[in-house]
Amino acid sequence: MNIIEKHINFHKALLVVSLLTGLCLGNHALGQDSKPNFIVIFTDDQGYGDLGTFGHPTIKTPNIDQMAVEGQKWTSFYVAANVCTPSRSGLLTGRLPVRTGMYSNKRRVLFPDSDGGLPAYENTIAKLLKEVGYATAAIGKWHLGHLPQYLPTSHGFDTYYGIPYSNDMDRVNDIDYKEVFIDPKYQNFNVPLMRDTEIIERPADQNTITKRYTEEAVKYIKENKNQPFFMYLAHSLPHVPLFTSDDFRGTSERGLYGDVIEEIDWSVGEILTTLKENGLAENTYVIFTSDNGPWLVFDGQGGSSGLLFGGKGTSYEGGVRVPAVIWGPGNVKPGVVSKMGSTLDILPTIVSLAGAKIPQDRLYDGFDLSPVLKGENQSPREEMFYYHGDHLFAVRKGDFKLYYYSNNPAGYPEKLEKLEMVTLYNLVQDPSERFNLADKHPEVIQEIEVLAKKHQEKMVFGETQLEKVIIK
């Protein structure tokens, strides 16, 4: 072989290596770091039965349904609490709300006159990912403190765009609480729309809020496609009052509530399409879930728990078990996961997948679910503790859930009562909690009570943040 042939073969070899490298890099061709991206989509008051893939007969959710086909559908997935504020703190910190001070028996969530919020010393997903080079953004409902020191930009997020608390707050008139939701007008709710720490619109036009959150999310993905990012998109809906854009109003068989859910499904579709068009789909995990069960007292304006008992404001299954879908082409093994998972597990799972570390200076309540996503393992979560304020309402271990308290299954008005005799349900065989098995399984009750005792002995309650009020 002469010198010219050697030269040609050398360059052919280089070309093959270059092509193979390009194929291996795939979605990284745009220069993105090999670290995966993460998007958490968190809806507000969406019930277990409010998606097509979870059994709703008339609400059309083709994009989320497709996510479930291509990814994992978790059928026993729990939130950290049965109402907004504590539930959100659990997701972002991986810790039970009673540890972080995001609980109260008097004021169960934060309000516009609240002087408290998520303490600065708590670690959030965003904070931990920032340490390993991630860009971070929060879009939508925050509800962990509206004062500057509590906003997303003080908790590891580079940017924030959204409404800092529930969309039904700051009512501007004395119309009856339920009546104002029958024909909702955004002008009746003086909620602020914020950019970082500044109010840019008040009252926020909630008719277009889902659309604008979506546009913000799509823009963020495009602008950050060349670096690893974490985006937390917390929709303000379907929390009442219900609002939807003109494109979706009156289009669902389910009425206004269905219009709202179907617009959120459209939003999910826009995000997935953007990921695919920008070569990011195979390097991004998308988690879709809800903050608690449906607000049943609002009848048709509220959602459905499906076959589950109870709703928002209760720690029955309908209040704390939520629809959950995890998508990641090539990274998430498709299937239905019936074992337990929780929003508390999202922080350790994301941190693990990102190659970051969780500081060992405090206790966490989450588990790393990444082996389950890869199809390698069963869920490491074997237990779940359900708090109502500072009361340990129930405990689940394996298939069984033991109750210490009872509550109005509609959630409101709250009627928390200590049970004279505990009740026990096999949630695998009886997810609707119809058959009390306490008399048949005293050994299970004893096992769970030992678990609960050990848990409570180690529990250190944080100072409540929800009872602090701004003094005018």
Image (cartoon, rainbow, N blue to C red):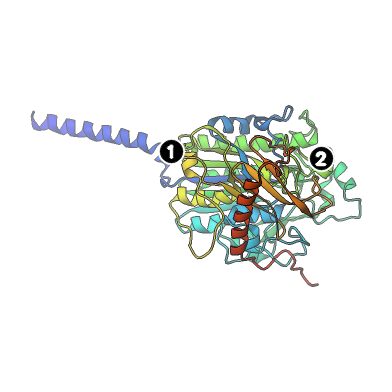
Does the residue at mark 1 contact the one at mark 2 (Cβ under 8 Å)? Answer: no
Q: How many marks?
A: 2
Query: From the image, which quarter does the C terminus lie in?
Result: bottom right
Rounded to the nearest whole Å, what is the CA distance between mark 1 and mark 2? Answer: 42 Å
Q: Taking 388 as reference, is 23 left or right? A: left
Q: Which residue is mark 1?
A: 27
Which amino acid, by three-letter code, is at mark 1? Answer: Asn
Residue 182, visible in the rendered structure: yes
Note whether residue 225 is visible: no
- The location of residue 78, given as percent across then percent down, is 63, 45
Q: Which structural element holds mark 1?
A: helix
Which is more N-terminal, label 2 or label 1?
1
Residue depicted at x 59% and y 57%: 95
122 and 410: which one is in front?
410
Mark 2 Cα within 10 Å, few/some/many (few <14, many 20+)? many
Q: Residue furthest right?
A: 175
Q: Position of residue 226 (x, y in %)?
A: 45, 46
Q: Position of residue 365 (x, y in %)?
A: 57, 55
Please, what secondary structure does the residue beneath circle 2 have? helix
Residue 339 vs 446, above or below: the answer is: above
Residue 407 placement, left or right of 449: right
Q: Foreground residue, 215 or 461?
A: 461
Q: Nearer the viewer, residue 72 or 355?
A: 72
Viewer-side label of 1, 2: 2
Q: Which numbered circle lies on residue 301?
A: 2
Q: Residues within 10 Å of mark 1 (few under 14, many from 20)?
A: many
User: Label 2 amino acid?
Assistant: Gln
Q: Is residue 58 toward the left or the right of residue 15 in the image?
A: right
Q: Position of residue 427 (x, y in %)?
A: 66, 39
